[in-house]
Amino acid sequence: MNRIDETFARLREEGRAAFIPFITAGDPDLETTAALVRELDRRGASLIELGVPYSDPIADGATIQASYTRALEGGIAVEQILAMVASIREAVAAPILTMISVSLVHRMGMQAYIERAKSSGVDGAIIPDLPVEEADEPARHGREADFPLVLLSAPTTPESRRRLIARRSRGFIYCVSVTGITGARDELPAEVVDHVRALKALTDTPVCVGFGVSRPEQVKRLAAVADGAIVGSAIVRLIHDRTDGPREELVRAVGDFVADLAAATAPRGS
């Protein structure tokens, strides 16, 4: 069993949901990213998403797009990110997933990317722009390597495609909470609960919710219905806001923020 499946099995036994933070690899630099991954793990992250910068993301809001631009201007490359993961893997208990465009994977070749990423200590990949109709062969490569490939389901996804996503997504299903792009929001739509329940009726694969999640009360609400909550833009913005100060203070501030969010997944009554 891979680390992702092991983590969700353990959380299920504990009666709690996963907390999954997202950060952009290489923003502001890889050394800081490595320090942040270790801190996220130490402060309660169940799994960690590493965004692989791409010049033309399709669903990322202004905050994450800007972080990708900064990282690309700094010369970040996929191989550097994988080497960084390999350098810290033994110090990090939480599973690490890459959030990566299918274009970057295609450039290397799906099977080659999976083999290279896994050998570096990456546990799975979220490929947001991989259409489910084209995911059969990539999913097969992932199954053969025990390297889960996570697919996304949006509020507008029809039931027929949701069924395909439920069959082909491994590790978990990324349930997009809103129609549109990533970014912190004051309120999550009431329909997200129905979306989660519709997906969970189709599969035993965990369902985790992202897009717009930014506060402990939102994480707590999602933890009552979903298997995990994902927070990205709010963390990426905090990193950028602290970039001009000492790295230690940046890492500590992000760790404090993440600890509060992770605490919101605690079982009721604990």
Image (cartoon, rainbow, N blue to C red):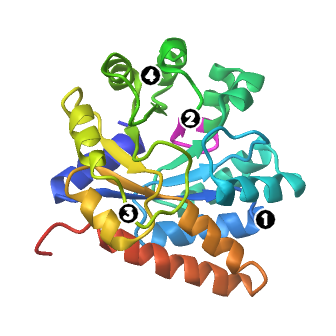
The spot of residue 250 in percent (x, y) is 65, 81
**7 or 21: which is nearer to us?**
21
- Disc 2/disc 4 C-alpha distance (Å): 18 Å
Q: Report the residue marked by disc 4.
A: 143
The quadrant in which the C terminus is found is bottom left
Q: Report the residue marked by disc 2.
A: 128
Q: Mark 2 and 1 residues: CB-CB less than 8 Å, in contact?
A: no
Q: Report the residue marked by disc 3.
A: 187
Q: Amino acid at mark 1?
A: Asp
Q: Residues within 10 Å of mark 3 (few under 14, many from 20)?
A: few
- Disc 4/disc 3 C-alpha distance (Å): 37 Å
* Vertical position of residue 132 compared to residue 3: above or below: above
Q: Amino acid at mark 3?
A: Glu
- Disc 1/disc 4 C-alpha distance (Å): 33 Å
Q: Report the residue marked by disc 1.
A: 29
Q: Amino acid at mark 2?
A: Pro
Q: Which residues are magenta?
A: 118-128
**Discs 3/2, front:** 3
Give the residue drawn at x 66%, y 34%.
Answer: 101
Return the disc, 2 or 1, that comes first in the chain's sequence.
1
Instruction: For mark 1, give the secondary structure.
Output: loop
Q: Residues within 10 Å of mark 1 (few under 14, many from 20)?
A: some
**Discs 2/1, front:** 2
**Discs 4/3, front:** 3
- Disc 1/disc 3 C-alpha distance (Å): 32 Å
Q: Residues within 10 Å of mark 4 (few under 14, many from 20)?
A: some
